[in-house]
Amino acid sequence: MKDVIVVAVLAAIVVLIVRYLANFKKRGEVCIGCPYSKQCGTNCGSNAQKKYRS
């Protein structure tokens, strides 16, 4: 019985993560989790790479 509960909790977590990512895609976010997602357009990480280059 404990195994069924653990599997159900893990499945619920996965479903919530997928819904979270789908909502970001609907809003037009390009790089989910990137602080520069609204600025770099379709090239993920382009601003972050410029920032750290000397």
Image (spheres, rainbow, N blue to C red):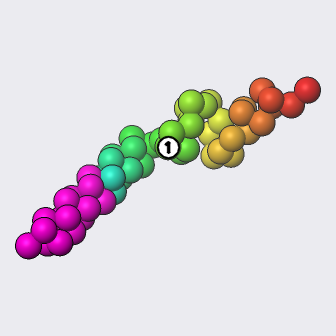
Residue 17 placed where, x, y %?
33, 52
Q: Is residue 2 above or below residue 26?
A: below
Q: Residue at x 69, y 41 (%)?
A: 45
Furthest-front residue in this view: 2
Q: Quadrant of the C terminus?
A: top right
Position of 39 with respect to 47 (left or right) is left
Q: Which residue is mark 1?
A: 32
Residue at the left extreme, as displayed: 1
Q: Amino acid at mark 1?
A: Ile
Q: What type of secondary structure mainly makes up the magenta span?
A: helix
Tell me, yes or no, whether the highlighted magenta stretch contains residue 17. no
Q: Position of residue 46 (x, y in %)?
A: 73, 39
Specify whether 16 is left or right of 24.
Answer: left
The x and y percentages for residue 1 are 8, 73
Instruction: Look at the image and say whether residue 9 sits in the magenta stretch.
Output: yes
Picture quadrant of residue 9? bottom left
Which region of the structure is painted magenta?
1-16
Q: Is residue 15 visible?
A: no
- Position of residue 3 relative to residue 52, above or below, is below
Front position in the image: 24 or 41:
24
Residue drawn at x 50%, y 43% as measured from the top left = 32
* Above or below for 13 versus 35: below
